[in-house]
Amino acid sequence: MSVVMCASVRPAFRVVSLLLVILLACMVSVIVFFAASGAVALAAPPAQIVAARGPVLQGSLPLRYNAHYLGLEPTIRDGVITLTLAYEPQDNPNLRGFVNFYVLTEDGLRRYLAGGDLRTLNVAAGSPLQFDPVGNKMAAAFRDSGRGNYTVIVYNNSDLPITYALGVDGGVLIDNANQTLTAALADPDPTPTPSPTPTVAPGVADPATFLLPGAITARRVSGSFTRPSERHYLNMEPDIRDGLIIFNFTFEPMDVQELLGKINFLILDEDGLRRVISGGRPEDLNLATGFPVPFSPFPNELQASFNASGNQPYTVVVYHNAETPATYALAVNGGILIDQYGQTNEAKVAAMEVAALSGATAGALSGPTAGGPVLVATPEAPSVIPASEVTTVEVSDPALAATTAPTLTLGVERLAGELNQPYQHHYLGLAPTIRDGLIVLTLDFDPKDNLALAENLNFWVLDEEGLRRVVNGARPSDVGLATGSVVRFGADRGKLRAVFNASGRGDYTVVVFNNSAVPATYSLRANGGLLTDETAQTTLP
């Protein structure tokens, strides 16, 4: 009987064992599935910027006052670290003394960004390499004292574009902002899978090209902050795929210590913007931010550069964390800035123009006139000044003279000229008719259907200091306050417009130039100021 019982138990035991094995396998499969799913969910999506690390990094500094901020990790503790910089073109003696590098500790970098003197904060600086037959190499050596990581600032303060190679012995160089050419070549996915282009239903606006009324696109924008913790969110679209993008940022007033480190800009890619929307801090997710350039004569200028990955759009966050009100100007080389939300001065002017054209606010650009209609500048009346302006011109109409103030300012609102030679320039005077207000300059030109002319005809606005520097050899593009950007909407569509805040009543200079071989005619209009021509280069339109 016991034998029969044992025989009947064994098959049952086998079945139970088999069920347990199957159940265990299922549990393992479920655990593996959820673990894999969790890993995928927690993994960060691929970023557009890939850090470049190595003993040698190569870069390009094409503009004056360009700089790259690179990380440096020692590979040995308390050892000697040697850095060597070689730059090209190597046979130009004008570069000597203008291309170099400095090394800062983490504390030194914080103090430098807060306004400290780089000459006293650095732990090492490049010196001409001894016995170098070419003369294009700078070297420095210092002993690491276990103070953590370092920052190497490579800068170009010359007027010539340069390329460089920075090598280190005893450490590793790091580029986390895709500034160098080495980082641009570090493609994490050399054969990306093309994503299908989404189709847009008929009658529906394409989100990629949709702009709100008054939105502007420009290579330079300006704005103002009146309260702490203000932000302006701008878009930036690269001009070319995988190209170098350079941002130049200036702020005013420049002599207020509180603003140092409190007004700046950050650049986010699409993934960084999504993570900021989800609660991340822009300071932790940005690709690049503004840094001062060593020994630049302008302490209120910040610069950032990086190599764009593909041609996807980026987000630029301009922020202000100080109690002192401030104004700023942001220019980009290699891309186009877009303000969709009316934050910048240029967008506000465009919105007022759209409102004026739609009849919502008549005479938005010239302002309301007490006791009479608004006078809007027209080509047929170039010398008529809006009645809201506080200055006057000599006019014969007693009705106009009765509305003017006792101060006399000579000039006209419009001037026309011809630029028939390559690299021809016209220098015109500009006197503000309002104190500390917005001045709008609009340039129309012909022919408009010539691409070479459209890319090479424009104008710059210089203050008195900028004009002195241009006379001494500086380029207007390096010292200009504003330059023309294409108007996308309204009656002035296709023309070039610049908007800037006049400081006081000091005079300005407008440099109209044509760098092409195509002869052209132009007409320049000023709102908020009067134009003068002391050299008879122009005529009244």
Image (cartoon, helix red, strand yellow):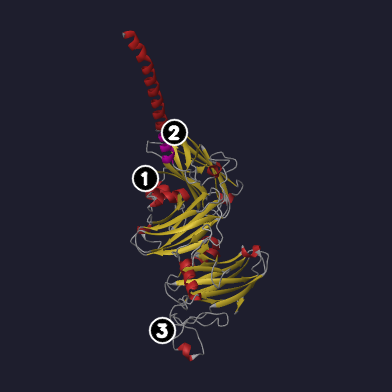
What residue sits right under mark 1 in the picture? 107
What residue sits right under mark 3 in the picture? 370
In percent of width and height, residue 176 lies at 47, 44
Between discs 2 and 3, the one toward the N terminus: 2
Between discs 1 and 2, the one toward the N terminus: 2
What residue sits right under mark 2 in the picture? 75
In percent of width and height, residue 73 lies at 44, 38
What separation in Å lies between label 1 and label 3 (alpha carbons)?
A: 58 Å
531 versus 92 height, above or below: below
Q: Read off the magenta span.
A: 34-43
For this view, does 169 lie left or right of residue 88? Answer: left
Residue 39 highlighted magenta (yes or no): yes
Of the residues shown, which amino acid type is indicated by label 2?
A: Thr
Of the residues shown, which amino acid type is indicated by label 3?
A: Ala
Residue farthest toward the bottom in the current orientation of the protein: 398
Q: Dot 2 surroundings within 10 Å: few (below 14), some, or many (20 or more)?
A: few
Between discs 1 and 3, the one toward the N terminus: 1
| Residue 268 or residue 318, whichever sits in front | 268
In percent of width and height, residue 247 lies at 50, 55
